[in-house]
Amino acid sequence: MLEESTTPLAEAHDLVMFDLDGVVYVGDTGIEGVPEQIDRLRSTGAHVAFVTNNASRTPDKVAEKLVGVGVSASPEDVVTSAQAAARVLLEEHGEGARILVLGGEGLRVALGEAGLEPVDDPDGAVALASGYGPDVRWRDIMRAATLVRDGLPYVASNTDMTIPTPYGLAPGHGVLVHTISGFAGVEPTVAGKPEKPLMEETVRRVGGERPLMVGDRLDTDIEGAHAIDAPSLLVLTGVSWLEDLVAATPGLRPSYISPTLEGLFEPHPVPGRTDDGAVELGGWTARVDDGRLSVDGGGSDADWWRVVATAGWLHLDSSGTPVDLGDTTPPGPVRRLGAE
């Protein structure tokens, strides 16, 4: 269930890790109010990190995009799945190891900066590293898959099945990983969210003892926070929405919920239960009758989401099936900016 914070989250955490698309920007457009909110967070002295599963871009390029949408950022604030993959490979094979690369510039740069030698020729390579790269050739994929089948260790930057593009959601790097692993019969070591390496690399690089993950996706951002036992804030400006939230199993549930990043600067109360089994908070009351959710009352949008999530999870845990949302409409403007 949700956790309580009697003080604003910005005061309770000294490291805030932000997912990018759906949290800070959508495509090439910054989300309204986010630059000011991040500046406000920095003024508290908290460490700020921007965490991305995208292995194709270098931290410099990511920081450049952030600045372009009005967010104060430097390359040192950015941690990528390519950097996490390089750390995994360095710890396993040591400095100077030859790593066969199947991916873009971001992966090659991360491997080189870690003291590894990225190569295109498999001769002498001790492992394969893959990441999203729009120019990866099919013949290189075939060769890599054959080598993995024959025993070459494989580290994948991430397993995201989709990637946002100007023409909509397209197949992501996870499709490539599935192709290689399915052919080879080998599961790779995965560096990106929701696995531990990227989250641990972020804490290592940026610093902080009380991290908070902020994301818009339950299956990467929130699950990734669970992997390192860190609390998380789900914002509703991106992909995960009402249907996803009430169907979330415990490993996908956020610690806190807020419609926007303004939730960083607010306390987070938790709903209570009434004698008849309803869930209430801040003027809202949620009930589940015959598997169907209903919400009555009034109050803040954030409290509405808290009572709905709690009622939905209680029903899911007791019945094994998600609640029926046929009578449920979220309050306020629909902010699914990151959804396709």
Image (tube, rainbow, N blue to C red):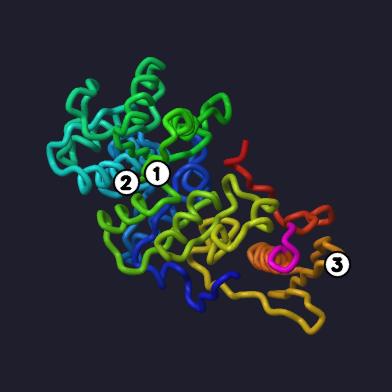
- Amino acid at dot 1: Thr
Q: Nearer the viewer, mark 1 or mark 2?
A: 1
Local SS, label 2: strand
Quick one: label 1 or label 2, which is nearer the N terminus? Answer: 1
Q: What residue sits right under mark 3 in the picture? A: 289
- Amino acid at dot 3: Asp
Q: What residue sits right under mark 2 in the picture? A: 78
Identify the residue shown where x is 35% and y is 32%: 130
Numbered marks: total = 3
Looking at the picture, how far across and down is residue 72, in whole percent? 34, 48
Q: Which one is in front, 62 or 114?
A: 114
Tag 1–tag 2 contact (CB < 8 Å): yes
Q: Is residue 8 left or right of residue 123?
A: right
Q: What residue sits right under mark 1 in the picture? A: 52
Answer whether residue 205 is visible to the viewer in this image: yes
Identify the residue shown where x is 74% and y is 66%: 315
Magenta-span inclusion, residue 319: yes
